[in-house]
Amino acid sequence: MLSYFGRSILLALLTAIPSILVGSVLGAVIGMLLVATGSVFSPAAGQALGVFVGLATLFVGMLFFYRFGIVLPATALGRPFGFGEAWRATRGTLGAVLLLTLITTVAETLGSFLITGQAGFGAPPLVRSPLSFAFAFVQLWAWFVTMIGVSLLTALYGHYVEKRELAV
């Protein structure tokens, strides 16, 4: 279990570092463009910048997560499998991983928005409901996203490492 926990921490770092770099660069470049065009004073421009940079950062993080994350099923099975091996095992799969990343990013973002009303477009009815109900629904959504993530990582591991065919 400690090995799994340690690999999870390393995976978080391996996905956070590129995400932070992309978010910082995008935020700085777009921010400079907003200042240069005089749009910096528009609340809508700032809000759009935040949403775009947030989605781009999430997308990059998930892209690295799916490439490196297959170490977790291997660790759970007690098989030695490093991050370098994970990267090599998923080499040549950029198109499939990009599509998977796009689908899960959109689904996670829409689901989170419908539940929490984040992104500044006003709170949906769920958030205006009693706090305990909203909290329970957020926890249910987090559990659902976690289970989907575990299933995807297991399928990726089985397909790219164990060379099992995907059932369609």
Image (spheres, rainbow, N blue to C red):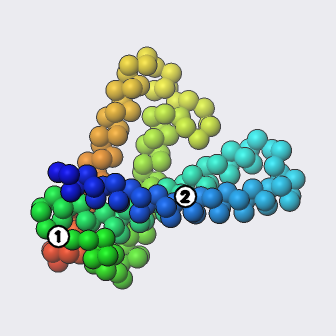
Residue sitting at 57 percent across and 52 percent down?
54
Residue 51 point in image, percent of width and height: 61, 49
Work out which residue is located at the far bottom of the displayed protein and give it: 92
Residue sitting at 40 percent across and 76 percent down?
94
Residue 11 point in image, percent of width and height: 35, 60
Amino acid, disc 1: Pro
Secondary element at tag 1: loop
| Residue 93 shown left or right of residue 57 in the figure | left
Residue sitting at 18 percent across and 65 percent down?
74
| Residue 105 shown left or right of residue 25 in the figure | left
Amino acid, disc 2: Ile
- The answer to which image quadrant residue 78 occupies is bottom left
Q: Are marks 2 and 1 in contact (CB under 8 Å)?
A: no
Against 168, residue 146 (above or below) is: above
Q: Which residue position is annotated with label 2?
A: 20
Residue sitting at 79 percent across and 61 percent down?
33
